[in-house]
Amino acid sequence: MSETGETGETGETGETGAGFTHLDEQGLARMVDVGAKAETRRRAVAACRVLLSPATYDLLVRQALPKGDVLTVAKIAGIQAGKRTAELIPLCHPLLLSHLDVSFALDETDHAVEVQAEASLSGPTGVEMEALTAAAVAALTIYDMCKAVQKDIRITELRLLHKSGGKSGTFEAAAAGSSAP
């Protein structure tokens, strides 16, 4: 028994007494066995923001940056990364995604690019990490393609916006400006 009173025993869902599915009975990391889980339709949406200077933002909008069409390259990079999440994040399951897309919204007021990634599949485990990875790598690609003209680019607010499917049900992130963390 641990100091917190948890036994560390594994229940039917694969969770240890502390509720962590990625730990075995000895508290060591393991990949969760999802073989017995029901296949359900699962979807996740993630987002982040890339904050640019007014000059860099203008170059991006006009597609006048030295490295070329930033948003097209960032979209492809995000999709590629989302498909390879299991190679990047330890203990993530390799998934047969049925859909993965990255889109961008330009925020002229804040000189920002809002990156959004959506992933879906029918399977035994969720696609949150794939959506988050796709959004993050798309943002990193924007940074890479703009760094020749601006060094202090900021990538902020990487977050899960939506998750549906599976035993835990649907999650919707709190609306902007709410008191939720």
Image (spheres, grey):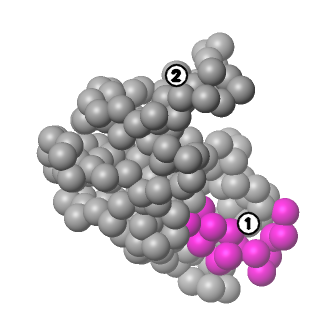
Residue at image point 57% right, 53% down = 28
Residue at image point 59% right, 72% down = 141
Quadrant the C terminus occupies: top right
Q: Looking at the picture, how far across and down is residue 6, in whole percent?
A: 58, 25
**Visible residue check, residue 105:** no
Residue at image point 54% right, 29% down = 7
Q: Which residue is mark 1?
A: 56
Observer-nearest of 51 and 119: 119
Q: Earlier in the sequence, mark 2 or mark 1?
A: 1
**Visible residue check, residue 92:** yes
Q: Which residue is mark 2?
A: 174
Give the structural element (helix, strand or loop) at label 2.
Answer: loop
Q: Looking at the picture, how far across and down is residue 135, in whole percent?
A: 51, 57
Observer-nearest of 120 and 63: 120
**58 lies left or right of 24:** right
**95 lies left or right of 81:** left
Which portion, as a residue range, is magenta? Answer: 137-152
Q: Is residue 155 above or below residue 152?
A: above
Amino acid beneath label 2 = Ala
Observer-nearest of 148 and 126: 126
Q: For marks 2 and 1, give the CA distance.
A: 31 Å
